[in-house]
Amino acid sequence: MRFEDSGNVPFDDGASFQRPEPGIGEGRAVRISQFAKILAVVRKRKWALIGSVAATVILVLILTLLATPQYTASATIEIQRESRNFTNVEGAQAEQAATVDQEFYQTQYGLLGARSLADRVSTDLRLQDDAKFFELFKSDKLDDWFENGKLKPNASTRERRLREVGEILLDHLSVSPERLSRLVEISFTSPDPAFSKKIVDAWGRHFIQLTLERRFETTSYARKFLEDRLTQLRVRINESEGKLVDYAAREGIVNVPTGAALAQDSPAGTNERSLVAENLATLNRELAKATVERVQAESRLNTAGTNVAEALENQGIQDLRSSRAQLVAQYAKMMQQFEPNYPPARALQSQIQQLDRSISREEARVGSTLRETYRASVAREKELGGRVAALKSGMLDLRRRSIQYNIFQRDVDTNRQLYDALLQRYKEIGVAGGVGVNNIAIVDAAQLPQLPSSPKLLINLLVALVLGLGIGAGVLFLLEQFDEGVADPAEIETTLGVPLLGTIPKSDDGDIFAALADPKESVSEAYFSLQTALGFATDHGFPRTLAVTSSKPAEGKSTSSFALAKSLARPGRKTILIDGDLRSPSIHLMLGLDRTSGVSNYLAGSDDVDSLIQPTAYPDLFAMAAGPQPPSAAELLASDRLQRLLAELRERFDHVIIDAPPVMGIADAPIIGSRVEGSVFVMEAHGTKKGVARVAVARMQAAKAVVMGVILTKFDAKRANYGYGYDYGYGYGYGDQARGASET
């Protein structure tokens, strides 16, 4: 049995509680992997899983046997990449990129499944007028359009029948490209093997014919179209160029080629620029420079006095300032020994004043020069601004006059570009000769199917088996979600936040007291293991005062209280069992005690404890009945009389066990739990809902009660989420009878 030191929780009487690790009391720590849990769930609900799989397999088997056999005919065709590199000229280069090839082949796959191809096959085989075709595919239009195998007059149009036949053919056609190759497999499935072969043959044949016709029609039409368009464009180019020249001469628009145009020796067009624009750009650049110079001159002019750059850089001013500094230094040194009226000092002072006047004159001269420079910059900026403004007006006027000119220019450029492009394409088509080599060939013709392609019984059964397993897994998941009872003791700590102290197996014959009377029984062994676990719960061993409660009645708390008290008294420790359930007591019935006096008497004011303690049939085990039922049990338990009673009983007995009432709905159990050294929570396996147990434990903890752990009672190993018996080990070594009981 392994424990982990997680700190001590102090009690009111100075004792401490050491929280045990989950699973103590079982002799080993239970650690189950997720895979083992899944296997346990499958084992527990195996019939639900088997039923789901069996139902799915039977359903699929029935549908497979009732299905109409389908026959699939297939043919393989090769589609080579079309080469359009007729001449080695720009604009006619072959596209070899992988993305272009993929686009080409995807287009071919789309053409294989085109409605136009389905219409050609239908027309060639006259399927739109064949009642057997609609009957073969069980079309709902059969009775509306046909009667005794013949068309009904005015019942439908040829276009409607062609559209219906095309939809049926495309629904049963499959186009499957072979990876990393030019091969494509076309397949058709129908109830008639001969008809499937006929459709595949016709489909491949018409696809080749359609490709050749489309190429021929495209090239012949393109040649005629290009010839007409080139003739029209030549006339339009001449007209548009004439209009352009006439308008430029009439409006006086003169453009000069730009540098790019001169380098390329290109004709007038987009690489031209007007003289006004050239002059405006040049003067605008000069105006920007003049503005910069004026701002610089203004900045130097506005700089105060000696801080101006010209003054700081003037060599004469710097020499004067240097001389003045020397004289000031001499004067300061002289003042350390003489008065200001000392003649040499007065002479030095006069020289300093003379230097100051010279420096002021030089700085004034620098300022005058800056003002002249600023006025010149302003005048130049103003003159350039006026010329730029005049050119702007001329430019705006030119733009107004150039609107129509630009329209004529764009017309000329567009016509010339169209003419050049069409002329190049016309040359390519002329070299190609209109029709190239066929790039589509049938590699393997369709064969008459001998065996049906569907339904496939074995595959369908395998699919049904997998589907049934999936449905069964879903059913198991839903059943586990709706089952809120605890079937796995390992869930206790994660669900309630308190450790599992012990697991009490369900009695085989239902007589729990007979099982407790026999030390070799698994129930008796389980309670002894529980006692051992609680013996490690505190630093002084088994708690001196212990309350046993549960979330609701009939979970086994009274039995657990009695079993713990009996187990403690067996080695000679004086133990008293108190019936703390004042509302629905049961200890007096369990032990055959007198209920006329008990706990309620002491809480109501009686101090005669000896008269309330009753002996039992078990050595060193005493009991105290609940006594008469009080009008308000919670008020009595909340008084300090309960604390006094427990203090007096601790002096007389080694251990005090209290059978507390259930937690839910009443305040008795939390009050008792706050007065004792520790509490244990009894939870019925497979019965108590996890949510109810969480609320009950939270109420106990909110009342400052120390919940030492949980006792899982009425545990049925057959219903547990384990792949082995959880009660393995109880009764070990007691002969075949005990071993047989443990196996059950």
Image: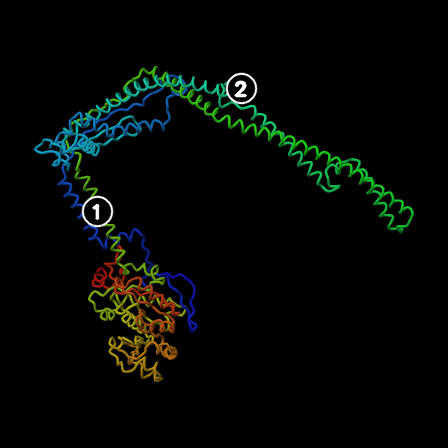
Q: How many marks?
A: 2
Q: How far apart are marks 1 and 2 (CA)?
A: 82 Å
Seen in the picture, residue 119 relative to 510 is either above or below; the reply is above
Callout 1 amino acid: Gly
Q: Given the current orientation, which residue lies at the most extreme left position? A: 148
Quarter of the view holding residue 351? top right
Q: In this view, does 53 lie to the left or right of 109?
A: left
Which percent across, then down, holds residue 438?
27, 19
Seen in the picture, residue 385 relative to 507 is either above or below; the reply is above
Identity of the residue drawn at 27% across and 56% down: 481
Quadrant housing the C terminus: bottom left
Identity of the residue drawn at 45% across and 23% down: 408
Quarter of the view holding residue 41? bottom left
Pick whichever of labels 1 and 2 is earlier in the sequence. 2
Identity of the residue drawn at 55% across and 28% down: 395
For disc 1, the marked residue is 468
- The front one of 532 and 164 is 164
For disc 2, the marked residue is 262
